Image: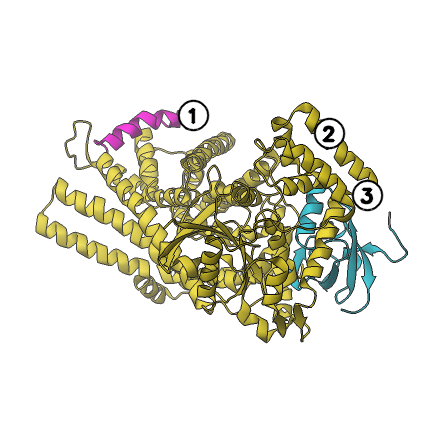
Amino acid sequence: MLIGGNATTLDNLSPGETGKVVRIDGGRGLVMRLYQMGFVPGAVIKVIVNRGVGPLVVDIMGAEVAIGRGIARKIVVEPTKGE
Amino acid sequence: MKEIRVALVGQPNVGKSTLFNVITGESARVANWPGTTVSKYEGEITYRGRKIHVVDLPGIYGLSTLTIEERIARKYILDNEADIYVVLVDAAIPEKTLALALQVLEITPRVVIVFTKMDMVHSRGIHLNLDGFSNRLGVPVIGLSAAKGYGISSLLDAIIDVAEGHYSKSPYRLNYGDLEPYIGSIEEILRLYSDKVKYPIRWTAVKLLEGDSELMDELRELLDKDAFRRIEDTIRDAEKRISESLQEYIAITRFSHLMDVCRGLVLRKKLPSHTASEIANIFYSPIVGPLASIGIILAFLIIAFTINTGFPLTLIMERLGFEEGAALLEHYSISSLMGTAFEYLGALIRGAMGEGPDTSLIVDGVLGGVGTILAFLPLIAIVSTGFAILEDSGVLPRIAVGTHSLLSRLGLSGHSIFPVMTSFGCNVPGVLVTRATPNAWERLKLILTIAFIPCQARLIVILALATAMGPLGGLLAILTYLIAITVFALLNMLMDKAIKHEKQVEILLELPPLHKPLPRVVWWTVRSHVTHFLSKAGVVILAASIALWFLTSFNFNLSYVGNVEDSIGGAVAGAISGFLTPFGIGGARATVVALSLIVGFVAKELVVSALLVSTGAETVNEAFRMLDLSPAQIASLMIFTTLYVPCLATLITIYMESRSVKVTLSATALMLSVAYITSLVIYWILSLFF
């Protein structure tokens, strides 16, 4: 269930694209872990590596984080322009 | 004056252990957090006449109860174990790492915030207004660089300041907007139980609304049914009032508060560039990544082990026809040189003291034990150096990410690639570098099972036994290796299924920026591994060697006997030889085999020499003929010796790393039972054909 015309999931963003976290579609534990890592609604994620298969590597608040693809599919983002 | 107790808090990668080592220096020591296998680092420093005791809490991302590390850190803070909490913030990624500081501030005001890695800040074009942070947060904020060694005394001054009472008396307060009335209601209820609820009231209220199940369970016990139900009702009302989940609302509130705190205080002149990290992106490539990762580690391990014993390079050289070169390399390898030195020393002593129990004690017992310890030191030092370089530079976590999907099919995580590969050379450094795994549960699994991986010494035994099998021997050797590796992987997979722990199948890992490894940090790691091995494992190995020498040189009358068969060890071998009956081996033959297996516990290579000595044979082939062993029996023996027990040094290293007798005994019991069952099954299958 997506809100707004633009929203997609993190695994769909290409390297170089940025997105703002809308929400996390996951269980309590995963959601907590992601919030703690900085993936809070409103936070901006920039994709560094996304090869369509395997983990993604993103920049969140200046830190480089590797995310498994399954987890990335649960992070709903709204693509944004620029840094 | 009273000792000041300080706890270091911070996210992983923030530079906590570097700061800890710089402050505590030689006094640093490690133990286990009670009831866990998580390492607890403590140390002291005396500054301006005050004794400061420092505890390094495990690196955490938050104060919930998701991981064992979080539980440990949270409990420590809530139980008020320290006088002052020093929270580390990475100056290069200030907003992300400050989040934890705010969470700590909501619990206690006795905090000093430290911005580490200040030396990196300038080159990255970041400007930080530390005084501004101090004003907004109401606590001292110190900038320092543990790596370069400046700012430490300012930190210690601030610690003493806070210890002397210069801090705000009430915890920092975050405004949770629409949730405030509900927080207030819960606070009121909790205040009635202030004698039972030892935690900060407001913090507890917020946590309950956030859905902290451990706190809920705790309070369900402590409070009256009625009071607890009122809290549950309040939470339900809050859920109705707020459109998002409470967990999300609180996270968003904290985040926007964090941004408010940082606003205007963090100025970035340059766009962060990831060029150095971009080169490392090769590790994430689905095919090249794992290959490059394994390649780098393999190259390093080949060098490390070649320096130590010449193998595997000597094997390659022999195959290529450079036998002379191979022999030369082996002769001048560290292991060989040390062996020669000890032999020379042993001969000297024998010459001076003549033969007899005393001489044997010194040469075989003491010298043998010391020799064993020293034999492992160069290897440990070399492997630790490589490990520290890979880890500190930031390459190791990237390798972990790259190999993770491959390894997770084997019930392992990417972090285990280095310890697993090392163990193929030798289990002792393999167990030591299981520290590569940040997750305590994964590390425990590894420590329990890594000895199944056949090391160099076992390869020698496998090859020696294979020669007695003719052409089939080579095939059997390969099969044995595969069985061992399969057993290792299966056990790891089963343990994940059997024990519902914080299993993290998917990777979610912060990667520190790539940088030149600091020689200082590498040195600390190597020095720590080597000195721990010497002081902890070393003593035990020496004692065990002497004990084993005694058991294999003396009989029950406590008189010295020249050979193993007549000793206590020999009698034990006779007693357990009954276990070999299902393999069709009985009587005196069984005792010989059992004896060589017992001796093999000290060092696997000794199995072969024990067999030769006991039978008086010159080759393994001859020994097997004399023992009348069938191919099926030889095959099952090969498998058994590969799987049955970690060698003495490995066993003691397991104890040293886990600091738990339970873990050490479990690993041994696991190996013995798996080895017995597996070799028995192989025997039954093979004896149908041979």
- The reply to whether the magenta stretch includes residue B575 is yes
| Residue bearing mark 1 | B582
From the image, state whether disc 3 or disc 2 is nearer to you: 2
Which residue: 76% across, 48% down?
B177
Position of residue B535 measured from the top left corner of the image (x, y, whole percent): 31, 50
> For this rendering, which residue is in front, B242 or B456?
B242
- Determine the image quadrant of residue B246: top right
Position of residue A67 measured from the top left corner of the image (x, y, whole percent): 68, 54
Report if the CB atoms under discs 3 and 2 are less than 8 Å apart. no
Q: Colour of chain A?
A: cyan
What is the three-letter code of the residue carrying label 2?
A: Arg
C-alpha span from label 1 to label 2: 66 Å
What is the three-letter code of the residue carrying label 1?
A: Pro
Position of residue B39 measured from the top left corner of the image (x, y, whole percent): 46, 46
Q: Colour of chain B?
A: yellow
Position of residue B516 measured from the top left corner of the image (x, y, whole percent): 51, 70
> For this rendering, which residue is in front, B385 or B268?
B268
What is the three-letter code of the residue carrying label 3?
A: Ile
Query: Please, which chain is the residue tagged with disc 1 on?
Result: B
Find numbered disc 2 in the image and state the secondary structure of the residue it sits on: helix
Q: Is residue B179 visible?
A: yes
Find numbered disc 1 in the image and state the secondary structure of the residue it sits on: helix
From the image, state whether disc 1 or disc 2 is nearer to you: 2
Tell me where the magenta segment starts and ends, as one range: B565-588
Q: Residues within 10 Å of mark 3 (few under 14, many from 20)?
A: few
Q: Earlier in the sequence, mark 1 or mark 2?
A: 2
| Residue bearing mark 3 | B242
| Residue bearing mark 2 | B230
Above or below, comparing residue A14 to residue B58 in the picture? below
C-alpha span from label 3 to label 2: 18 Å
Q: Earlier in the sequence, mark 3 or mark 2?
A: 2
